Amino acid sequence: MKKINLDITIHEWQLEELSVEDQELIRASIDATNHAYANYSHFYVGAAVRLANGKIVIGANQENAAFPSGLCAERTAVFAAQANFPKEPILTLAIAAKNDKGLLAEPITPCGACRQVILEIEDRYRQPVRILLYGTNKIYSIDSIKDLLPLSFIDENMH
């Protein structure tokens, strides 16, 4: 038997330690929480992506009484960016969340389906997507979705 250890690096920041561009993206993700439709869970998630051309595109979770019909904030942002700017790679994705009490103190991470979609974006453009996970107590930055989705499945696995 051989043991394999996976090593990931997550950087922890305070908002004021981030670059002006990252702070702007975080604020866009926080603002995007106001566009969430979370009538059932009351869990409002906002996402914002910065494209290679500098544009910011937001997304927010959209729930539905038929639960599989809803969509996460990360995927709404990524899909909106790809639909409107299909030639522009996503450089950075920021995610924030709140509930009825306000913004969450701890960062949240993307669900498995969102991780797979972000992985496809990295594979499509052959470059990593940096991820910023916002919490009022701290912000995590991750250099690539592969750090959150080790042993991942991409197109080249099928060939």
Image (cartoon, rainbow, N blue to C red):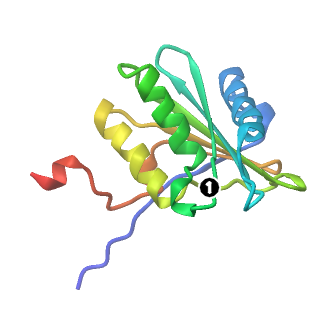
Q: Residue 55 lies in what quarter of the image?
A: top right
Please tell me whether residue 155 is drawn above or below residue 7 in the rendered image: above
Q: Nearer the viewer, residue 128 or 35?
A: 35
Horizontal side of 37 relative to 68 (left or right) equals: right
What is the crowding at mark 1: few (fewer than 14 residues within 10 Å), some, or many (at least 20)? few
Seen in the picture, residue 1 relative to 153 is either above or below; the reply is below
Placement of the N terminus among the 4 image quadrants: bottom left
Q: Position of residue 143 (x, y in %)?
A: 49, 42
Farthest residue to the left: give it. 159
Mark 1 residue element: loop
| Residue at x 31% of width, y 78% of height | 3
Where does the image place residue 134, in percent across and percent down from the top left?
71, 45
Q: Is residue 142 visible?
A: no
Spot occupied by residue 101 in the image (x, y as percentages of width and height): 90, 56
In the figure, is residue 136 to the left or right of 123?
right
In-front residue for pair 136/41: 41
- Using the image, determine if residue 57 lies above or below residue 134: above
User: Hey, which residue is sitting farthest bottom in the picture?
Assistant: 1
Instruction: Find the residue positioned furthest to the front.
Output: 65
Q: Does the image show residue 27?
A: yes
Tell me the amino acid under the disc marked 1.
Answer: Asn
Residue ranking furthest to the right: 101
Q: Residue at x 45, y 21 (%)?
A: 84
The structure residue drawn at horizontal position 45% and vertical position 44%, both measured from the top left corner, is 144
Q: Quadrant of residue 24?
A: top right
- Residue 86 locus on image (x, y percent): 37, 22
Q: Which residue corresponds to the image point at 76% horizontal and 33% vertical from the top-left?
A: 31
Q: Quadrant of residue 27?
A: top right
Foreground residue, 151 or 18? Answer: 151
Question: Label 1 belongs to which residue?
Answer: 64
